[in-house]
Amino acid sequence: MPHTTRRTALRTLAAASLALASTAGAQDTGRWPDKPLRIVIPTPPGGALDGTARLIAERLSASLGQPVVVDTRAGANGAIAYALTAKAPPDGYTMVLTLSSLVLTSLMAKSPGYTLQELTPVSLVAMLPNSFAVARHVPATDLRQFIAWSRTRKEGVDYGTSGPGSSANILGSMFAQQAGINLVHVPFKGEAPAVQAALGGQIAVVIGAAGTLAAQAQAGQMKLLAVALPNRLKDFPDVPTFGELGFPAVSLSGWSVMAMPAGTPKPIVDRLSAEITRIVQTPDVSARIFAYGFQPEGSTPEAARRFVQDETTRWTAAIKATGITME
């Protein structure tokens, strides 16, 4: 009997400990947030993602009653920011505003420092449609003319992107394969220097965010030939999609998802998802995000998780088809 009594006592003590831990966790979640939060981003200050993050941070701070700071951790095609967030405590105070490099780096880098399983998607914040634009010196006003011109250039045609292994890099490689032309990738440290190189006549093509290149087209500095979307841009209804032009597999665009460390309490994830969705769908914020070249979205955590899974499958196939690496 003494052994039975001891085992019973231990079971009772264990059950009580679990109950106390559960109660403490609920209380901790109930007190959240009681200190500043941070949004990590994988790009330098001053860009479109930074601006979007600061818009969200400002509105979140007003809603949650705590400061929300933006922490820029650029480098390694996003791996630094993603690994930092993945290894952060899952207490609801650290999140990362990703780009599609979240998936691409995990698939292509030899040692990314994180796995997708270490992060929990919170909300699909925005889509970042890629587009294909040519410099003014290129003798083409549509994609068919560009393809014909490209085939006359034995040395190939240079195209610039924001960097190796980017969604734009993969799009360019896939388009070249399907069109039967030679496109030579010239990686830059961001889209802005790629655009400047095109304006200066150093490269012929830029593949990048539709918002950025559309602005150059509006100013008459570049010619926008195609967008990588299911439907045409509402501000550029005359610019066809790759699908319309016979290249449906080239509809590869970027995106931005808010994510947190895996294991973050579900009530916190759900609260932040609802807040972020409300914020990005607020008309004034939505207009400002759109001006950055993004298409505001907003979603539930479950929808964001399915989206990342689907994108992982899609980009895995695209990487395999093109053989692109980050080297």
Image (cartoon, rainbow, N blue to C red):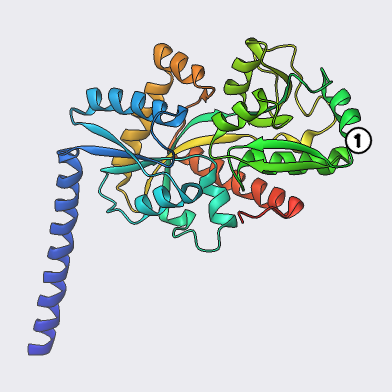
Q: Quadrant of residue 215?
A: top right
Residue beneath the point at 71% across and 11% down: 237
- In the rendered image of this protein, does residue 21 appear above or below residue 127? below
Residue 256: image location, x then y, percent: 49, 35
Residue 138: image location, x then y, percent: 80, 23
Task: Report the label total.
Answer: 1
In this rendered view, identify the residue nearer to me: 237 or 80.
80
Residue beneath the point at 57% across and 22% down: 212
Quadrant location, the N terminus: bottom left
Tell me the amino acid under the disc marked 1.
Arg
In the picture of the structure, the residue carrying the numbered disc 1 is 151
- Would residue 2 appear left or right of 251 to someone viewing this image? left
- Would residue 139 appear left or right of 136 to someone viewing this image? right
In this rendered view, identify the residue nearer to me: 262 or 12.
262
- Would residue 321 appear left or right of 257 to someone viewing this image? right
Residue beneath the point at 20% across and 31% down: 67
Q: Dot 1: what SS?
A: loop
Q: Is residue 292 visible?
A: yes
Residue 16: image location, x then y, percent: 12, 64
Q: Quadrant of residue 83?
A: bottom left
Residue 272: image location, x then y, percent: 33, 34
